[in-house]
Amino acid sequence: MTVTKTQAPVSVDEGKRAAGAEPVGSARSERLSALVQQHGALAVLVIVSLVATFSFDSFATGDNVSNMATSSAFLAIVALGMTFVIITGGIDLSVGSLFALGGVLAAWGSRHGTLVALLLPLVVCGAVGVVNGLLVARSRLAPFIVTLAAMLGARGLMLAITDEGANTYLIGKGSFLAELGQGTTLGLGNPVWIMLALFVAGAVVLRRTRFGQHVYAVGGNEDAAALMGAPVARTKILVYTLSGVLAGLAGALNAAWLASGVTILGNGMELEAISAVVIGGTLLTGGLGYVSGSLVGVLLLKVIQNVINQIGSLDSSYQQVVSGAFLAVVVVAQTWLGRRRQLM
Amino acid sequence: MAPPAEVLAVRGLSKTFPGVRALDDVDLTLHAGEVHALIGENGAGKSTLIKLLTGVYRPDAGDIVFQGRPVSFATPLEAQKAGISTIYQEVNLIPLLSVARNLFLGREPRNRFGLLDFARMHREAEETLRGYGVRVDVRRPLRSLGVGAQQMVALVRAVASEARIVIMDEPTSSLEPREVETLFSVIRRLRDEGIAVVYVSHRLDELYAVCDTVTVLRDGRRVHHGKLADLDRLSLVSTMLGRELGEVRSEGLTKFTGEHHATDTRPVLEATDLTVPHQLHGVSVSIRPGEVVGLGGLLGSGRTETAKAISGALPTSSGRVVVAGVPLRGGSTPAAIRAGVSLLPEDRKSEGIVPGLSVRENISLAVLPRLSRFGLVSEARVDSIVNTFIERLRIKASSPQQKVGELSGGNQQKVLLARWLAMNPKVLLLDEPTRGIDVGAKAEVQKLVDELAADGLGVLLISSDLEELIEGSDRVVVLKDGAVVGELTGDEVTEDKLMRTIAGEAPARDAGGEAATDG
Amino acid sequence: MAEAALKTVPLDRARALQWLQRYGVYAGVALLLVVNIVITPHFLSAENFRTQAVQVAPVIIVALGMALVIGTEGVDLSVGAVMALAASVTALYLGYGLVPALLVVALFAAGAGLANGALVALVGVQPIVATLALMVGGRGLALVLLPQLKDLRNPQLASLGSGDVLGIPYLILIAAVLALLVAFTVRRTTFGRQLLAIGDSRPAAQLAGLPVRRVLIVVYVVSALLAAVAGVLATARLQASDPTSLGNLMELSAITAVVVGGTPLTGGRVNIAGTVAGAVLIQLLTATLIKHDLPPSWTQIAQAVVIVAAVYAARGRGKR
């Protein structure tokens, strides 16, 4: 038996009548907390960026901004897939390994042509995602443990391909793949444009398609969603697959950018992606989230990283501390906001 | 006007679970535009019947003919698609999604690019809801609405997905009176639109306000059906509880001695004015040492909530509990237990026993700190207590190491009693102590309650078994809709009197004067 | 109730499954031992056993705490980060002597556990989410305190890492003592039984008046303290503090050991002997593959398969 607030009257026009005094206040606080949830990260991003612009001459330069944008792009693509997974109430810890695997596969495949270089990472990482999804949705295993195992397995696979990490495959200069990763269009790196295109597509899918509605429904209340006719298992399998494909793609683009499939990348990237998604206002318990928020979360993390580097005397590990602290604050705030809304 | 079409015809429906015949040869007929009350006490078979109709269970025998065709639903979704929707007391929608999206999930309007058309969706949602007298901002998340409004959205969703039958399982249990009114107007609209409604509730006023026909279930059988108007409240209650009015009370069916021990000392427990929003409205109960006080009332009248509020398991918004002259800190189970108040919860399986632990560990669970030194358990003392109670309560387990989850219901209940008796409580709150346990164990538990009271314990007894309640209690406090509507003492403690009080016909003197106003 | 409906065949299968869940890990260890004795040269040497045991000791210690947390139906993802934190703090305060350094380590670890426990028990955050924040931030903090690998020259610390009593390394002794202590706590103390009751049925534990919040907080503090012990011991063995890589993937190893050892993720039961055996099983598996020149990539894939298989096998259990 849940205690639920009953302040909103049924047949009373939005608080215009006598009994409405209370609902107006709670409707306002509801909207306020929704606003904080959705745009809090954006506000922090703007403030941090402004402060950084005035504090460091080298912050707001074209080069620096373009670099930040490019280095954000890869994490952002991973975070996009993670957003879908987290909205369904799951979690995907395998993306860091899949990112590395995708990069190595792209570099390895580039010897067999661009098509292979691009498709191979998507197919293999997507397949890992399918396995994750099947184990979570059909066998009903806990997502964190399934994807933790996948993290290990994918890293093993990556090491197996690279002779235990001893072999770094290079991507030839001038190839289409290299151009995709290193070239620029209108002053911004190609990966940034790809990332932006993916986010627009992701936002449309999430907000404007039935699949998107199912993603929210499954995360909001799985049993009710099933009863309302949403294909719960299929939705879950799809989001883990999507997350795998996007992590592989991000890895491939990153390899193209670096011109090699670096094997030591992607460690801890899953945590960065989760942090970005949660900071961006997506509920870790599922059912509520925004693609745009995840992008803001990624940018915020990268700007903070850049600021830490600008300060120079600070070690880059402060980045992680800041992420962790952000994560803790956001999670506590979400829990409290959620509970307050329920108990009121 | 031609007689309304038959929407549903259920013939000879039966369902057996291991050891229980949950539903036995039940018929049910629904016509278009009929509001049908389905009532019965706990275990009468209501929920089994609903689950059979909605595809949760499959019947062992009998047919369900829906709109002229025999049907057999494999899942609730299938039943829903065919046109049988269920509205549960806990709204089964998605709280974080907007009202409109909840309304349209799975059949959202799309534009020519195949994308969702929100403008149309919001417009249509608003129009549809307004048609039912519900004015809300459809863009707001569902959870920002009151329960009543949420339920209305669920209802409208059911109707919009072309339901022919809407089953409402205690829809008003957490509604404000104003919201109940709106619900009723929606139900009347459904009726006018030719939709059949099955209405499950224990609130008699509501039944008479909105229902046309009634089916009464008892012990898995249909014991009455017909027009509701032909049955007065008292007959309804007595049919439901299975007692004839004026029937000579058959003594000796229970193991209670009947002769009781109420001393005129000060109460060991005084609960005053307990209030829990939507559940309890100023309930007061006092228990003297050696007294068994029964809590009477129908299902959902606030009996369980009263017991939970006293034991600190349900936070109260006002009211206080005094145990042996000492006020209790509210909302804390450990504090209540320390003060000597122990609750045997109604939901034995999920709130009582710890199924994976052994009999021994379950019995010693609460008393453990007293049997320990510096956090180390004295196994010898545990053994001695555990063996004492296994013997005294005659708990049948293969060994004290057997998992409690493997025991029969009666023995599980005895283990829970042992857990509390080991604490030497002053007050025992027994919520349905004999439900779902076999006859032998039932008699033993009843006898034990008697003995405990004789030893000076204060006992609060909640039971849907009228006989048990009447014969076991010295006094019965009668609850209805979360408030005390009467108290039976001395010679008044009879089934007849109790049923009249519940039906609101003969309010007893002492408490709740305003109860006389209804009916 | 459902048991009555079971026919004989599923019953036999259920029994086989139950046997596998309970004793499978020991059978696995035995099998690996036999296989190794047959195919691996010098496997039976005392030196080999000592190496294996020293390597597995930190995993066992972390897994003990993890087993307690999982027993409450929780999980602690921050153990690797806490190990790194312990390594950093040890390096920072070793100048004041080993004992003061260890005290500061304990303080840090207790703080970390308190943060986890408070989030879980007081705020009501899911355990995975609550411990994730520290998993992210903890290693960062460790690296902030000590940016890179640092060699430690402290004879006391060195002897802690490589010394022995009657040929048995301290590491192994400490792991054994801790395992016994935790097993004793689970079996013989009020705390242990309350922990199991909370993990099995939280509503029942609450209604029985158990101090649910206190027990949960203590469990996370104990888990962090044990992770810190493992971190200090690993540092002592390396004679260097390595916050970058120490404890990486330790949460996975520990969870694997616990799950393989027959402790269900659904809480309510803690199998300490099984947990130790689970850690040993993974260690033997890795060692076998390495000894036969199979690359580490294989061991990672094998470990991934073992963990999924164990979780899959444990799936039906706990839901009666």
Image (cartoon, coloured by chain):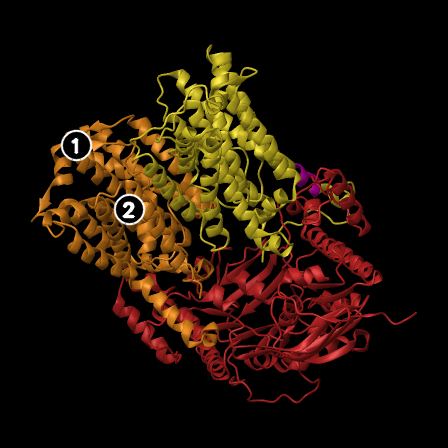
User: In the rendered image of this protein, which colour is used for chain B?
Assistant: red
Chain the render paints yellow: A
Position of C298 with respect to A71 (left or right) is left
Q: Which residue is mark 2?
A: C62
User: In the rendered image of this protein, which colour is used for chain C?
Assistant: orange
Q: Pick whichever, B430 or C216, lies toward us.
A: C216
Residue sitting at 12 percent across and 52 percent down? C44
Which residue is farthest right?
B1
**Residue B212 at what x, y percent from top left?**
80, 70
Location of residue B431 with respect to A290 vertically, above or below: below
**Residue A289 at what x, y percent from top left?**
57, 38
Report helix, strand or loop for mark 2: helix
Q: Which residues are magenta?
A: A23-28
Q: Is residue A24 magenta?
A: yes
Residue sitting at 11 percent across and 41 percent down? C163
The three-letter code of the residue at mark 1 reads Gly
Location of residue B147 with respect to B438 vertically, above or below: above
